[in-house]
Amino acid sequence: MNYRLKFGKPVKSILQLQDAFFICVILLSMLCQSGLKAQDSSEHHDAFERTGLIMNALEDSLKSRDTIDVPFVMTRSPLKAVLYSMALPGLGQLYNKSYWKIPVIWAFGGYFIYEIVNNNNKYLDYKDAYLRSQTPYNPTGDQRLKTIRDFYRDQRDQFYLYAALVYMINIFDAYVDAHLFDFDVSDKMRVGLFKDSKKLINFKLDF
């Protein structure tokens, strides 16, 4: 059987016609693939260009924001808070508006001062009694009075140390509190994953 193409070239068998058809299909698929690759490359190139434009815009906005931002100024001066607390314990807390700390400082300080005065008076009383117990017949005096005298002296010195510790804590607390005055240090913290009213997770921590 003899077939003839439109171009006038004879095809001697059906196998030759099938070969020609498969070759055409392969050529068309290769052309389509090359076209798709070229389109993908152009799309990728456009995407990269758009990404670069977005990044440049973000950098410009950040630079402009940095130039506009006002520098941070502390509301409370730590130096003033320290000087106030050194002049009068609790005055630095008053400057920092930590009013609840003032009665605490005064309570501890007042108690320690009272113990200092009380133990010192008893120390002086037993010191005089011990001196009177020393006689030519008993130059060492009453050892019991001496032991009590030494006890009240040691108690007085210990309360001196406690009062000094409260005084230093008062100064340190005023200094730190002045630094943290402009920050939120509340004892409640809420955490949520979403900003809308219907949060999936919302829990509260109380310290």
Image (cartoon, rainbow, N blue to C red):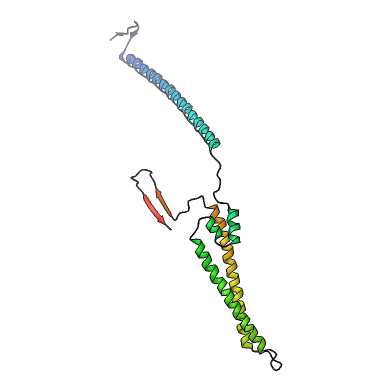
Give the residue displayed 54% in from the left and 55% down from the top: 95
Nearest the camera: 79 or 58?
79
Percent from the top left, x then y, of residue 20?
A: 35, 15
Quadrant of the image containing the C terminus: bottom left
Percent from the top left, x then y, of residue 162?
A: 58, 69
Q: In this view of the protein, can residue 173 be seen by the observer?
A: no
**Numbered marks: total:** 0
Percent from the top left, x then y, of residue 129?
A: 63, 86
Above or below 102: residue 54: above
Horizontal placement of 142 versus 207: left or right? right
Percent from the top left, x then y, of residue 59?
A: 52, 33
Give the residue displayed 61% in from the left and 57% down from the top: 83
Give the residue furthest to the bottom.
Answer: 137
Quadrant of the image containing the N terminus: top left
Horizontal placement of 85 versus 194: left or right? right
Give the residue displayed 54% in from the left and 36% down from the top: 68
Q: In this view of the protein, can residue 168 be seen by the observer?
A: yes
Horizontal placement of 199 versus 120: left or right? left
Nearest the camera: 37 or 104?
104
